[in-house]
Image (spheres, rainbow, N blue to C red):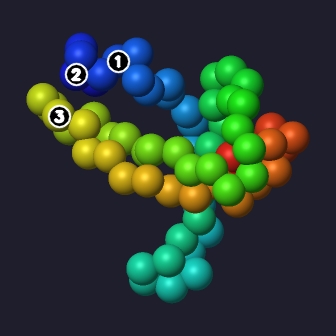
Amino acid sequence: MASDTSDKYMQARITRRQDYSPTLWSVWMKPPEELAFKAGQYVAFGVDQSEKVLERAFSIVSSPYEPELE
């Protein structure tokens, strides 16, 4: 990851993906540590691409009490 953004991100393991249509899908992620959030918040999902990070915002649909983010 680019060095100037490394403290902005945490790595999370994608545990599952479900496709609903060619353009609509869900992913479940397991963060390495507890992530505190409130209902209605979103996360910025970033993918490291050489010298920059491609980032998109996604709504969190899981409960703050669940072990994985959906």
On screen, residue 48 versus residue 51, left or right, reads right
**Residue bearing the label numbered 3:** 52
* Circle 3: element type: strand
**Dot 2 and dot 1 residues touching (CB under 8 Å):** yes
Residue, far bottom: 21
Quadrant of image for the N terminus: top left
* Circle 1: element type: loop
**Residue bearing the label numbered 1:** 6
Q: Is residue 15 visible to us here? A: no
Q: Where is residue 65 in the image (x, y as percent from the top left)?
A: 87, 41
On screen, residue 20 versus residue 23, left or right, reads right
**Residue found at x 68% / y 21%:** 33
Of callouts 3 and 2, which one flags the residue occurring earlier in the amino acid sequence?
2
- Which is nearer the eye, 58 or 23? 58
Q: Position of residue 67 (x, y in %)?
A: 80, 38
Quadrant of image for the C terminus: bottom right
Question: Amino acid under label 2?
Answer: Ala
- Which is nearer the eye, 7 or 70? 7
**Residue found at x 44% / y 26%:** 9
The crowd level at tag 3 (other Cα within 10 Å; few <14, some 14-19, many 20+) is some
Question: Amino acid under label 1?
Answer: Ser
- Which is nearer the eye, 58 or 48? 58
On screen, residue 4 versus residue 38, left or right, reads left
**Residue bearing the label numbered 2:** 2
Of callouts 1 and 3, which one flags the residue occurring earlier in the amino acid sequence?
1
* Circle 2: element type: loop
Q: Where is residue 47 in the image (x, y as percent from the top left)?
A: 33, 41
Question: Amino acid under label 3?
Answer: Lys
Task: Please tell me in which quadrant of the rendered image residue 61 appears.
Answer: bottom right
Marks 3/2: CA–CA distance:
6 Å
**Dot 3 and dot 2 residues touching (CB under 8 Å):** yes
Does residue 46 sit above or below 60 in this rendering?
above
